[in-house]
Image: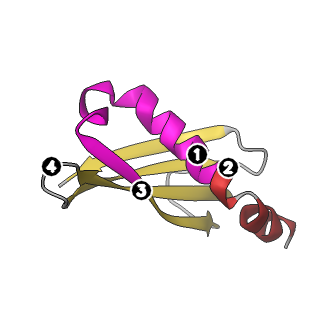
Amino acid sequence: MDLYKNIIEDKVMLYNLAVAYYNNIDEECREKCLASPKSISILMDHDFIVTPCIEIRLELSSQQEQKTIGNYFLYIDEEKVFVDEFLIYK
């Protein structure tokens, strides 16, 4: 339950961490996209991601058209150390 409590207490910091990682990998789209907090989950079992870990999802929207154009997923461990990331555009 400590992980759950930590996520609730650190929610804003976790979203900011995901935005910082996203900004590092996608400089080209950064100026055209708005990254908005979408969800934080505890991932307990996965085929190719080390678990347990925390999944932080950002929704990427076009600033001009105001529509969703993709999602960014950041996976970190309990100590907030990078595990993996995925960037998916529609």
Q: Earlier in the sequence, mark 4 or mark 2?
A: 2
Mark 3 or mark 1: whose residue is earlier in sequence = 1
Q: CA distance from mark 4 to mark 3?
A: 15 Å
10 Å crowding of disc 2: few (<14), some (14-19), many (20+): few
Residue 50 in sight here:
no
Tell me where the magenta segment starts and ends, as one range: 13-35
Q: Amino acid at mark 1?
A: Asn
- Residue at 47% over, 58% down: 57
Q: Which residue is mark 4?
A: 64
In the rendered image, residue 71, in percent from the top left (x then y), is placed at: 33, 54
Q: Main secondary structure of the magenta part?
A: helix
Q: Is residue 78 visible?
A: yes
The residue wearing badge 2 is: 13
Q: Which mark is residue 16?
A: 1
For marks 2 and 3, the one nearer the N-term is 2
Q: Give the labeled residue for mark 3.
A: 36
Q: Please, is residue 43 above or below residue 31 in the view?
A: below
Residue 41 vs residue 59, the one in the foreground: 59
Tell me the distance, in whole angstroms, between the alpha carbons under discs 2 and 1.
5 Å
Check disc 3 and give the amino acid type: Ser
